[in-house]
Image: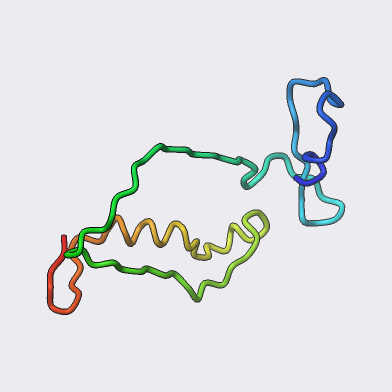
Amino acid sequence: MDGARGLVPGTLQGKTLINLDTEEWGHFYLGCAGGVDVEVRHDYAQEDVPPDYALLRFEVSGLRGGHSGIDIHLGRGNAIKLLAEALRDLRVARCDGVEYR
């Protein structure tokens, strides 16, 4: 998509863009495995962490990685999805014998 980003605004006059991007020379694919940028903003007020709260760090590591388009059929883990699923499923955490909900 870097080539499309490099176009000077106003160069193209059409209303539809067909993406022919592929990783294989001589092949043309219609569509894209991604290509969407999302920016989310939310106003919030910072607060100090209460002294009786436990701070935890979660890390997802050891994944194989790959290209989101050409390797998508391999079913490899996605760190963001795995972490979100783990946090969603987390009901009770125990730290130093204390139960936190």
Left or right: where 88 falls relative to 16: left
Quarter of the image containing the C terminus?
A: bottom left
Q: Residue at x 48, y 73 (%)?
A: 61
The residue nearer to you, when weighing 16 against 93, is 93
Quadrant of the rendered image containing residue 94:
bottom left
Left or right: where 11 falls relative to 37: right
Q: Residue at x 78, y 41 (%)?
A: 20
Residue 81, horizontal then vertical, whole percent:
44, 57
Q: Residue furthest left?
A: 98
Q: Residue at x 78, y 46 (%)?
A: 2
Residue 19 lies, with reference to residue 68, above or below; the image says above
The residue nearer to you, when weighing 60 against 27, is 60
Residue 11 lies, with reference to residue 77, above or below; the image says above
Residue 74 lies, with reference to residue 95, above or below; the image says above
Left or right: where 38 falls relative to 89: right
The residue nearer to you, when weighing 53 against 59, is 53
Q: Residue at x 23, y 67 (%)?
A: 54
Q: What number of labels is visible?
A: 0
Quarter of the image containing the N terminus?
A: top right
Quadrant of the rendered image containing residue 87:
bottom left
The image's colouring method is rainbow
Left or right: where 88 falls relative to 21: left
Residue 11, horizontal then vertical, whole percent:
87, 26
Q: Residue furthest bottom?
A: 96
Residue 99, horizontal then vertical, whole percent:
13, 69
